Amino acid sequence: MMMQPPRLTGAVLARCLLAASLCAVQPAAAGTARVDDSGTVVSQGVVPMRWRQLVPGRGADNSVEASLRVALRLNLSRWLNQPVKLYMGLAPVAGEPVHAAWRTQGRLLPGSVRSGARTLVFEGLAGTASLEETIELTLRTDGRALVSPQSLQFYFEVDTP
Amino acid sequence: MASNHEAIVCRLTDRRKAMRMRALPAFAHSPCSAGQSRWRGLIYICGTLLCTGAQAFSVSITPGTRSLFLQVGAGTMTGGNFSSGGTPGNNATVNSVSVTVPAASLGTGSLAMNTDSTVTASPYNGRAFCTMPTQVYVGGFYRAPGTEQRAILSAAAPVSLTNASGNTIPFNRVSWVSAGTADSAPTIADGTFVGGASQTLRRIARNTWFESCLQFSYANTQLVGSGEFKGTVIYTLTAP
């Protein structure tokens, strides 16, 4: 017998919409909150890492690195016209740490971060509901430890007073 | 007598393809339970996403490529020295090492051999390293991610050097001393060809450049007929 997907009942749908709407109007509270960056576009989904030196030196430089462009779109509507500290973070990775450094066009601060940490990229009033910025992201890690594809999870979060 | 040297570049096996093919079915089969609970789960996930949005962008990175390079005698590079970004290339030149034994010197003891290789500067950084016309440059690298073992540098010489009349000189009459300007710890140890078999010259640590200048000599301990005795030595760098 073929199973048909159940229809959304009115009660379930209403609960879903209610929960979503409550979240949408939830006022920003003091503390740390993740930022919706679902509008962000990464120029390359898969980035081949290259040895930093074409051939290794007698001192053995084992770093691999790669660069890519990321068009950020951060939804700051929750914090509009509020003082915020915006951080860019890189989730921990298994094995050797990954270092990320970036240059910006001026809306965010340039900087660097190591996997498992975060770095301040903006401090001040959130003057726009949607912050857009393009960054040149350079990734670096120990090439000896990178033996299979690895997914790096970047995130943004806001600290409010 | 002449002894030729040749650079060999070996192919590396790639295990990653096989791993990738095995991983795909795991994504192709999504275990499902009862339809009702699945749809409820989706609804709650939907609500969560509406609430928080996607909270991370992800970038997938892939390992650096594996590579292997060996230069014996003449080599090719473009764009400067290797350490300044030069690119190593293939070079089909087979250099010679030779010595002429005067009749009066037959069997009287070791004679130094000369080479037609003109490589005196290290391809790595251009420093003066080998001496012309007595030394042959041997260098290269093995680069790989992971914890694989060392690459092996080996040399294979035939049993003997042979002249046109079929007379022979055992290849183990040819030896070398490893040296290089300001090279206090030569990479390749001094040695003698065993002849008729491949012999390991050095285990090469990955991600490290190695280089030596080899100066060959002929033992000259026997009386042999006149003529030009020839044999070819093949140097091979093999990655695991």
Image (cartoon, coloured by chain):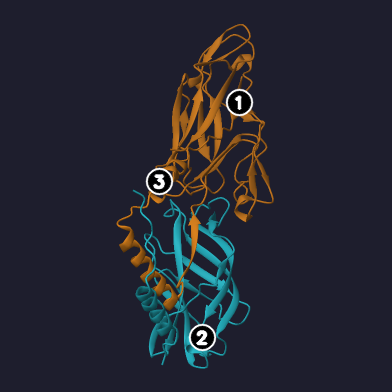
Q: Residues within 10 Å of mark 3 (few under 14, many from 20)?
A: few
Of marks 1 and 3, which one's residue comes earlier in the chain? 1
- In the rendered image, the quadrant that contains the C terminus of chain B is top left
Whether the residues at callouts 3 and 2 have beta carbons within 8 Å, the answer is no
Q: Which residue is mark 3?
A: B25
Q: Which chain is cyan?
A: A
Whether residue B206 is situated above or below residue A8 in the rendered picture: above
Colour of chain B in the image: orange
Q: Which residue is mark 1?
A: B4
Q: Position of residue A52 (x, y in %)?
A: 55, 57
Frontmost of labels 1 and 3 is 3
Disc 3 marks which amino acid?
Pro
Whether the residues at callouts 1 and 3 have beta carbons within 8 Å, the answer is no
Disc 2 marks which amino acid?
Ser
Which is more toward the observer, A87 or B211?
A87
Report the chain holding disc 1: B
Q: Residue at x 38, y 76 (%)?
A: A16
Q: Position of residue B46 (x, y in %)?
A: 41, 71
Whether the residues at callouts 2 and 1 have beta carbons within 8 Å, the answer is no
The residues bearing labels 1 and 3 have C-alpha atoms spaced at a distance of 52 Å
Q: Position of residue B117 (x, y in %)?
A: 66, 34
Q: Are marks 3 and 2 on the same chain?
A: no
Disc 1 marks which amino acid?
Asn
- In the rendered image, the quadrant that contains the N terminus of chain B is top right
The residues bearing labels 3 and 2 have C-alpha atoms spaced at a distance of 41 Å
* Mark carried by residue A77: 2
